[in-house]
Amino acid sequence: MAKIDEIMEVLTQEISGFNKSIGKLEELSEKFNNLKIQTDTSNLELQIKDYLSLQRNAISTYEKRMDEVMKKIEKSRWTPKWEVVMLYIVMCINTIAFGYLGYYFVKYEQKKEAAVLKSKKEGLGKARGYFDDHPIIYKDFEKWAKRQDSVPNRK
């Protein structure tokens, strides 16, 4: 029986502890039910505004940098403008110089040919008078000229 008394005492202690816990739970439940939660999003809104302003600043900085890069790309070329102009000037001077030298060479050749023809005519004119005076020498000259024409030039 002593054991049953001990068990009963432990059970009553447990029940009283349980009742106290239930009482505390009821108090907390009433406090919780009476508790009014106020939703304050001002801190969150402030953080979002800060983030958005940082994003705007970053985007504007990025756009400025891209504009600068595009301007630099436009300005940078493989060759500067003055170098291209100098190249065209040199090409024009070369074209004029070669044109003049070609023209001079053609005229020089024509003058040379004209001088050769003139000297041939003058030489033949003088020789013609001599051959007219000496017909036998003219016949020998014709034979010699035919032999010269038939023999290839060995120079």
Image (cartoon, rainbow, N blue to C red):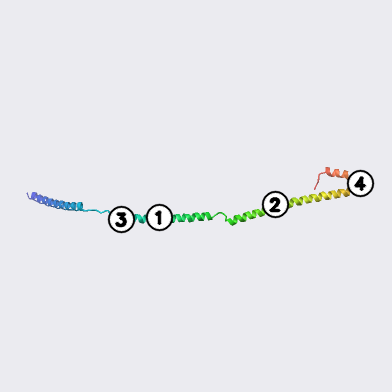
Mark 2 packing: few (<14 Cα in 10 Å), some, or many (20+)?
few
Whichever of labels 3 and 4 marks the residue nearer the N terminus, that label is 3
Residue type (three-letter) at the residue carrying disc 4: Asp
User: From the viewer's perspective, is the residue at label 4 or at label 1 nearer?
Assistant: 1
Image position, residue 72 (x, y; %): 51, 56
Q: On the rendered structure, is 115 left or right of 83? A: right
Q: Residues within 10 Å of mark 1 (few under 14, many from 20)?
A: few
Residue occupying the point 38% across, 56% down:
53
Tell which circle, 2 or 1, labels the residue nearer the N-terminal end: 1
Q: Residue at x 88, y 45 (%)?
A: 141
Q: What amino acid type should be assigned to the residue bearing mark 2? A: Gly
The answer to whether the residue labelled 2 contacts the one labelled 1, judged by CB atoms less than 8 Å apart, is no
Q: Secondary structure at mark 4?
A: helix
Residue 92: x %, y % from top left: 65, 53
Residue 128 rendering spot, x and y as whole percentages:
89, 47
Cα separation, mark 4 vs mark 1, equals 113 Å
| Disc 3 versus disc 4: nearer the observer | 3
The reply to whether the C-beta atoms of the residues labelled 3 and 2 are less than 8 Å apart is no
Which comes sooner in the sequence, label 3 or label 1? Answer: 3
The residue lying toward the viewer, choosing from 109 and 149, is: 109
Q: CA distance from mark 3 to mark 1?
A: 21 Å
Disc 3 designates what residue? 42
User: Do the CB atoms of the residues marked 4 and 1 lie less than 8 Å apart?
Assistant: no
Label 1: element kind: helix
- Disc 3/disc 4 C-alpha distance (Å): 133 Å
State the residue position of label 1: 56
Say which residue label 2 marks.
Answer: 99
The answer to which of marks 2 and 4 sits earlier in the sequence is: 2
Q: CA distance from mark 3 to mark 2?
A: 85 Å
Q: CA distance from mark 2 to mark 4?
A: 48 Å
